[in-house]
Every structure is written in structure tokens, then in C-alpha cells.
Amino acid sequence: MTSLCRDCLTVKAEDFDRCPACGHLRVVSHPALSTLAIAHVDCDAFYAAVEKRDRPDLRDKPLIVGGGTRGVVTTCCYIARLYGVRSAMPMFKALKLCPEAVVVRPDFPKYHEAGRAIRARMDALTPLVQPVSIDEAYLDLSGTERLHGVPPAASLARLALEVEQQVGVTVSVGLSANKFLAKTASELDKPRGFAVLAPDEAEAFLADRPAGFLHGVGPKFAESLAKDGFHTVGDLQRAELKDLIRRYGETGEWLKRCAHGRDNRPVSPNDDRKSVSSETTFFEDTGDLSVLEDHLWRLSVKTADRAKAEGVVGVVVTLKLKTSEFKPITRRISLHAPTQLAQEVFRTARPLLAKEASGRVRYRLIGVGLSGLSAYHSDGTDLIDPKVAKRAAAERASDKARARFGSGAVITGRAARMAKKDD
């Protein structure tokens, strides 16, 4: 048995509940603690944690990051979760469950700044960091013990302490021998947790869990599995692989692997996020094209800001709509050259919107996104539209002014009109 104190980083080849060096109780013990090297690191209620970091008066209050009674919860703190509030929940329902909650609008540039600070600390541990989102990543620390002088578990505990002390948010760590089990472990001890799940204990650990416990099995798929007689992960373990493939195709093979805790996917630093996007749900359903275009412009700016913050460009623009009957509509188009500019996102998505907004259908949600991402290097010259370079220069100048003097320093005519309408 190996034990690790998460506060003073003492590691000993013995089992102890209280650290013999510092006397603290934040101890993790496991027979394979010194040999496992694949981790999943996930920030705890990240956006809400950043807001509470910057506003200590909110520390003991339920906090929801989101906005608008017709909007949805972006995330919420753990106090709000005690009331039943969850991410993606309609705002009106969240406030009904927790009327005393404090609601703050998302501040994505601030979150990205904190995310970059955390990523820098991960990169200092190992070159094998695979981001999943702004607030979570997989790390492969194989072979780093010689570099850092401690086993991967101790390096991860130090990372958690540094993030908490220097960035001001907490993380939860899952440690195992593959990505699936590491992700599973990181969900077991939230918030501020550290859980270990070795491959040789995975089958027994998973067997009695509901099929929906497997990361990637959503509620609807879990219902389908239950109808077919697969209520628990153990049911999937006992199933014949051929039967699962016959029923669910390639997903059946994936289910079988997960049920037994197997995962041969490497931690790939090049496997970054595939898209950046923004969406909003309206206070009232609308089919008015001018209203929809105003929202599309706002979302184009948000999406562009996120792309710029992450240093990426996209070559595919996607428009997302949801009708008043909750029917989703998705339209996408490929660009001649990749972009991260709000003007280009808006100019590309606007004709797609015009085709759908005929006035006969009312919509409750609109969103826009960029995919086919790659690293940003410079603004290219579009021979089909020679004015793109001039628009790019103007938008870059506007970005600098906003960064220096605030979001209202430079606004477009459309934005000014929208602001006046909102007053």
C-alpha cells in the first residue's frame, strides 16, 4: 500500500489515515498509487469558482452563472446544486428551485485567462496534455518520475495545490491506467477530490452501477439499454460482443470495452476541441428576421471572442436554431479561408438565417459556431472578397480598444441600435 498526503505531499509505502508529517487528513491510499500515470483533471464548477474567487462575498451563497429567465444555466456552484440546480437547466426552473441564488452573466475572457494559467501548470508537468475543454484535460505522466523526483500521483497533488493557491479555483483528479477509468475516477470525489481506480478493480467496481454511469451513455441511450435488458454495467459485461454489435453497431463494441474498463486511446496533445460556439434562448419566441439577426450578431461577437482567446480559427460556420416546438435545425457552410472574426462569422451565417426565418416559424433559440479549427497565425487575404483584410484590420483595432478601455469603447452601428433597444 502506498499513501500520499495531498497537503504536504508526503509519500510513504504504508497505509495511513492521518499524515505522519503534517497531521492532516487529506490522504489518498492505494496499492497502485505509485505506478499509475494517466490522469483526468477537472476544475470544480469552474465558471462559478472564478466568480467566487473574484467576489468573496459570494463564497457561501448559491451562485448561478447564466442569464435571462428564458436562458439556461451555464454552470452553478455546489451550494446551488444542493437545491437541484444543474447545468443546461432552464433559468426559470433553476430560480424556482433556488430563488435566493445570485445570478451572474458569464465572463468568458476572464475564464479563459484562468484556464490558460491552469494549462501552463499542466504543461510544466508533461508534454502529453490533451485538453477536453477550458476547464478539464487528460495528462499522461508516464516517465515523469525521473524528471520531477516524485511519482505521478504526487505531481498531480502538487498541481492541485498550485492551482488552488495561485489561480484561486479547485480541481478534482482521477488517476488510473487509461483515459476512460481516469475520467470515471475524477467524478467520484468532487469537489477538491483525488480518486484512484486501477484496471484490476474496474470490473468489480463498475458491475453494480447503472448502465448510465458509463461516461458517454446519456439518459436516452440508458433508457434504450434498459428496454433491451441492460440495466447495469454488469449486464453489459456478461453480454456477448456479437449481440451488442448487432444491436448497436460500433457503439456496442465501445460499450463492451467500457464495461470492462478497457480503453486504448492515447493521451493526444493534438486532439484539441473541435468547435467554439455561443447560443441564447429568447425570453419570447420570435420569427422576426431583424430580431434574429440582432441576436446572431451578438453571438457572432461572443464566438469570435472565444476563438481569439483560444488562439484558433475555424473553416466551418454553423447556424443552430430551435423552433417553438423544440425542433432543432442546423445549417453549416464552409469558408474559403479560416477565420476568427465576428464580421466574417456573421456575414456567413446571415444568409443561412434568412432562408429559415420566413416569418412562418417562430424560434426559441439561436446559436452560431466555428468548427474545423486550427491555430491562428495571421489574417489571410480572401481573393473572392478583397475587403476582408480591411475588415480584419478594423476588427483587430476594435478588439485592442475594447481590451484597453472596456467593452463599450468601440461598438458597431448595429450594436449601438441594439443597446438603445435594450434600454
Image (cartoon, helix red, strand yellow):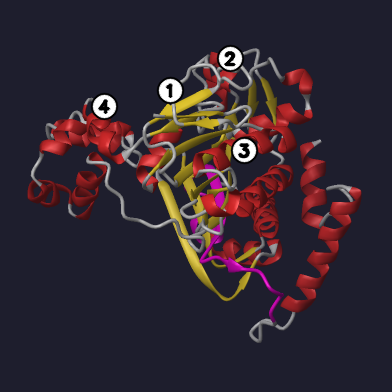
Nearer to us: label 2 or label 1: 1
Structural distance between the alpha carbons of marks 1 and 3: 20 Å
* Residue 232 visible in the current orientation: yes
The percent coordinates of residue 219 (x first, y second) are: 32, 33
Query: For the residue labelled by badge 3, is the local secondary structure a helix, a strand or a loop?
Result: helix
Residue 359 on the magenta span: yes
Structural distance between the alpha carbons of marks 3 and 2: 36 Å
Amino acid on which the number 2 mark rests in the picture: Cys
The percent coordinates of residue 151 (x first, y second) are: 51, 43
Q: How many marks?
A: 4
Nearer to us: label 4 or label 2: 4
Q: Residues within 10 Å of mark 2 (few under 14, many from 20)?
A: many
The percent coordinates of residue 85 (x first, y second) are: 52, 21
The percent coordinates of residue 66 (x first, y second) are: 63, 32
Q: Quadrant of the C terminus?
A: top right
Per the rendered image, the range of residues in magenta is 353-380
Number of the label disc, if any, that sits on residue 15: 1
- Residue located beneath label 4 in the image: 209
Q: Residue at x 70, y 82 (%)?
A: 381
Q: Residues within 10 Å of mark 4 (few under 14, many from 20)?
A: some
- Residue located beneath label 2 in the image: 98
Disc 1 and disc 3 in contact, CB within 8 angstroms: no
Q: Residues within 10 Å of mark 1 (few under 14, many from 20)?
A: some
Nearer to us: label 1 or label 4: 1
For residue 260, what is the image quadrant?
A: top left
Structural distance between the alpha carbons of marks 3 and 4: 31 Å
First reached walking from the N terminus: tag 4 or tag 2? 2
Residue 150 on the magenta span: no
Image-based side of 166 in relation to 284, left or right: right
Amino acid on which the number 4 mark rests in the picture: Arg
Disc 3 and disc 2 in contact, CB within 8 angstroms: no
